[in-house]
Image: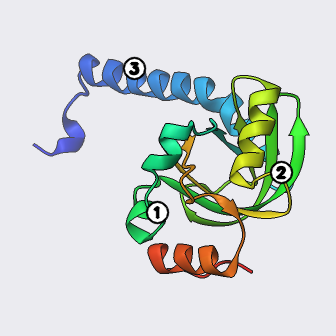
């Protein structure tokens, strides 16, 4: 007796039907996400990494060691960017090269208040021009790891992370 003469059991038909219905249900649930993905334009998508900043106290400043690769190595985020100003409670930086973390188009830095934000940015030298920002667990490192872009600090980033400075 060949397999073509055997009747198909009802259980097999129900199993196949349930698989088809499950696949249709999954597709129906995913359809809005698929449409969003298809309609998305990568040119208009702006992403941002959000960080916190706090001014160092006098005691904290005394505890700061000389900046070196070991100090920078503890950073979870390291980026070169350009200060773009304060927008509400955030300082906005346009990122141009990620050493660690990212990638994102912008870095948003916030503090407990606009005054605290301005003071912390000024004390770290992050309130104008091109800067280097290093952070750990979302908090900007303030013992010299972050600051205005200088050839020396830029070279330290390149040495620590083993990549070019993007500019």
Picture residue at 88% right of the left edge, 51% below the top: 84
The residue singled out by tag 1 in the image is 72
The residue singled out by tag 3 in the image is 18
Question: Quadrant of the rendered structure where residue 154 is?
Answer: bottom right
Q: Are marks 3 and 2 in contact (CB under 8 Å)?
A: no
Residue 113 in view, yes or no: yes
Front position among marks 2 and 1:
1
Crowd around label 2: few <14 · some 14–19 · many ≥20 (10 Å): few
Mark 3 and mark 2 lie on one chain; the one further toward the N terminus is 3
**On the rendered structure, is 65 left or right of 97?**
left
Mark 2 and mark 1 lie on one chain; the one further toward the N terminus is 2
| Residue 56 percent coordinates (x, y) | 58, 39
The residue singled out by tag 2 in the image is 41
Picture residue at 68% right of the left edge, 60% below the top: 147
Q: Secondary structure at mark 2?
A: loop
Q: Is residue 51 above or below residue 73?
A: above
Q: CA distance from mark 3 to mark 2?
A: 37 Å
| Residue 92 percent coordinates (x, y) | 81, 45
Front position among marks 3 and 2:
2
| Residue closer to the observer: 23 or 34 | 34
Q: CA distance from mark 2 to mark 1?
A: 36 Å
| Residue closer to the observer: 47 or 14 | 47
| Residue 138 percent coordinates (x, y) | 54, 40
Screen quadrant of the N terminus:
top left
Q: Secondary structure at mark 3?
A: helix
């Amino acid at each position: 007796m060949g397999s073509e003469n055997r009747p198909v059991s009802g259980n097999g038909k129900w199993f196949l039907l349930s698989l088809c219905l499950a696949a249709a249900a999954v597709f129906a649930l995913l359809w809005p996400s698929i449409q969003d993905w298809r309609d998305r334009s990568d040119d208009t998508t702006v992403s941002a990494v959000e960080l916190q900043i706090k001014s160092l106290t006098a005691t904290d400043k005394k505890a700061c060691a000389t900046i070196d690769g070991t100090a920078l190595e503890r950073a979870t985020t390291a980026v070169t960017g350009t200060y773009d100003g304060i927008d509400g409670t955030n300082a906005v930086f346009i990122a141009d090269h990620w050493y660690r973390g990212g990638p994102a188009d912008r870095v948003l830095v916030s503090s407990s208040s606009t005054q605290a934000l301005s003071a912390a940015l000024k004390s770290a030298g992050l309130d104008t021009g091109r800067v280097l920002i290093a952070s750990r667990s979302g908090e900007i490192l303030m013992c010299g790891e972050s600051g205005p872009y200088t050839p020396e600090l830029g070279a330290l980033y390149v040495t620590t992370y083993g990549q070019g400075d993007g500019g």
